[in-house]
Structures are given as C-alpha cells and as structure tokens.
Amino acid sequence: QVQLVESGGGVVQPGGSLRLSCAASGFTFSSYGMHWVRQAPGKGLEWVAFIRYDGSNKYYADSVKGRFTISRDNSKNTLYLQMNSLRAEDTAVYYCAKDAPWYFDLWGRGTLVTVSS
Amino acid sequence: EIVLTQSPGTLSLSPGERATLSCRASQSVSSSYLAWYQQKPGQAPRLLIYGASSRATGIPDRFSGSGSGTDFTLTISRLEPEDFAVYYCQQYGSSPPITFGPGTKVDIK
C-alpha cells in the first residue's frame, strides 16, 4: 500500500525543539525527492522544505531557514524534519509529500505541532 | 517569489452546476509546474491536476484544468456532493520556493 505516515507532533514551548518523522511505504522511497508542507489552523498551505532523492540538495522556505533541517534515511524509508527555535507561528499540521516533480502526488495525513507556553 | 491569487474566495453553487475557479500568478508560470489540489475538512490535500491540464490518477473527467502564463482555471463541469471542498493552486518557478494560492472554497448553495 502506497502511503506516507507522519509522527512526532505534539505540544512544545516557544524556543523548543521537535523532530518529525515520515515513514514511506509502497514505493521506492530512495528514488524520489520529498517535501514538508504545513497548514496553520484554519489557514492555507505553506511549503516548508524539500530534499532531493539522495539528500544532496535541500531547500527551505524563508520562514524556517536556519531553524528547520530536513533530512532522510533511505535505508529506513524515512523522512525527517528537525525543528528548532520554535515559534507560535510554527503551529500547524505538518504534512510530508512525495515530489512528482515539483508538485505533490502523495500526501501523508499530517501531524499537529502546537507551539504554546 | 511568485504570488498566486485565487478567485473567488468562496463559490456557492448547487449540485449539478458548473464551477469555474481562477488562479492568477504575479509573473509567468511554466505550465509544466502549475497544479491544483482538493482538500476536505480534516483531510490531507489531494492532487487533481498537474502540468496545468493533466488529470492525476483516478480523478474524474468532470475536473479539467486550463490556462497558461499568468492565468489558470480549474473547471468542475457538474458538481457532485463530494466536490464541495477547498481548492488550491500551486506553482513551482525556476527555483524554490514553491507557492500555493490562498484557496477557493466551493460550498453548497
């Protein structure tokens, strides 16, 4: 079954850190670039980060550059997002998505990150 | 950064009617990199259209995309009850970032 399953969300204080994971199955994970996209409560979609299939290139939205790090472990079919120096405005559902390329043809169900004291 | 504007913000229609959604870009977008997504409450977005006019796998033919340059359109020929949702356009330019439009909500009149 082709799917992406995110995990690792939760409640964290401002300035804190969290690491999200995205487990892929049903396709050759190591052949595809992957993205993180987020959606604040009641808001639209915001692209967060991209990593090439082999991890050689990474791109970030300006809003997270220097605070978030995208990475992957192709041996574990898993994508990660390390989030540091979290702010209230980072509160969102975080989706991982498969690159098609440069659009998203498979999405996970998302994991909610809440930044609050 | 290319900014996408979607109109209208909300479209109130009845089942069976035709829906026409607009997506306008602040500068020219390659048609190869314009996509449309549908999102229902509590669900992840679903890819409908890519390359401005190609339907994704499993998408009914009542959904169609058109346009080029800065003006793109998603048309739903006859609305089914399951089509009431929010629709987003998305573009990728010559380099990241990828941007989304703010969405159009199609609700039941």
Image: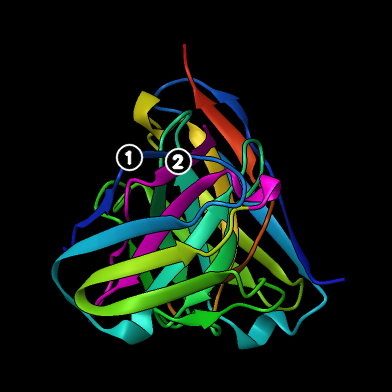
Circle 1 chain: B
The answer to whether residue B72 is visible is yes
Query: Vertically, is A45 above or below A33?
Result: above
Q: A113 or A86, which lies in front?
A: A113
In magenta stretch: residue A18: no
Query: Vertically, is A41 above or below A61?
Result: above
In the image, residue A28 lies at what x, y percent? 74, 85
Left or right placement of residue B97 versus residue A77 in this view: left
Task: Give the label on residue B62, or none.
Answer: none
SS class, disc 1: loop
Residue denoted by label 2: B105
Residue denoted by label 1: B9
Q: Residue at x 32, y 53 (%)?
A: B101
Q: As shown in the figure, which amino acid type bears the numbered disc 1?
A: Gly
Left or right placement of residue B92 versus residue B12 in this view: left
Q: As shown in the figure, which amino acid type bears the numbered disc 2?
A: Lys
SS class, disc 2: strand
* Magenta-highlighted residues: B80-109
In the image, residue B94 lies at what x, y percent? 22, 81
- On the image, which quarter does residue A107 sit in? bottom right
